[in-house]
Amino acid sequence: MKNKVIKYLDLGISEYKHTWDKQEELLNQIVEIKKANSSAEEGEAVTTPNYLIFVEHPHVYTLGKSGDEHNLLLNYIQLQAKDAGFFKTDRGGDITYHGPGQIVGYPILDLENFGMGLRQYIYSIEEAIIHVVASYGITAARDPHATGVWLDVGKPTARKICAIGVKSSRFVTMHGFALNINTDLEYFKHINPCGFSDKGVTSLEKELGSTQDFELAKELVLEKFTEVFGSTFV
């Protein structure tokens, strides 16, 4: 039986490492259920749960497993001066920044519940965020050469509004997306975001010229996520 119910956890403001540990705890829980199901008698398999964590992180830079540390343009002392942390992670993608005013979403989903593989999963996250941004009257799209959600794709003014970097184990996902709402974009000046030195970064606040309602933005993400994934939240 496929379970498309997603348990929603809003952690508020939480340190990056604490949230990473929480993701691994939930992922391992789901993986253990799947292992047990693989040897269970017919009719005895247990439905696997799904989770979506929302969080705001204190200032932190994270580097994907295929990323290049040279894309971090600050040394350790400068990082301390900027009051920012740095973590090497096991997600895909290169370097990015997380901080206040940014919706960071960590879906811990059993993709078999949704009948999709990793490529379609990433496409679906992008689709949900494109619809969120459209709710504000902003046209966003995919870049065929870069994961995430972008404005003005293919133009010199191309800029990213949402970064995506994920990991999966036995078709269970972790890590996720970071949507800039009222994010301090100055912090992106200290990295080549997602490994690109020729593309900019933006936020809803910058595009619309005013601070946005953060809670409303979270509600919109949940709404569009529900539509795209065919899920319900509890």
Image: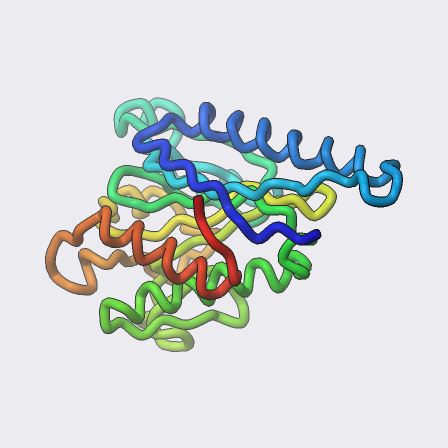
Work out whether residue 119 or residue 79 is closer to the camera in this orientation and state it.
119
Q: Is residue 64 visible?
A: no
- The reply, left or right, for residue 53 in relation to residue 110 is left
Q: Residue at x 36, y 71 (%)?
A: 140
Residue 125 to residue 78: above or below: below
Q: Residue at x 51, y 30 (%)?
A: 20
- The reply, left or right, for residue 187 in relation to residue 72 is left
| Residue 167 at x, y percent in the picture | 61, 44
- The reply, left or right, for residue 229 in relation to residue 150 is right
> Could you say which quadrant of the image residue 43 lies in?
top right
> Could you say which quadrant of the image residue 130 lies in?
bottom left
Q: Residue at x 62, y 50 (%)?
A: 3
Which image quarter is the C terminus in? top left
Work out whether residue 90 or residue 211 is closer to the camera in this orientation and state it.
211
Most distant residue in the left direction: 210
Work out whether residue 46 or residue 222 is closer to the camera in this orientation and state it.
46
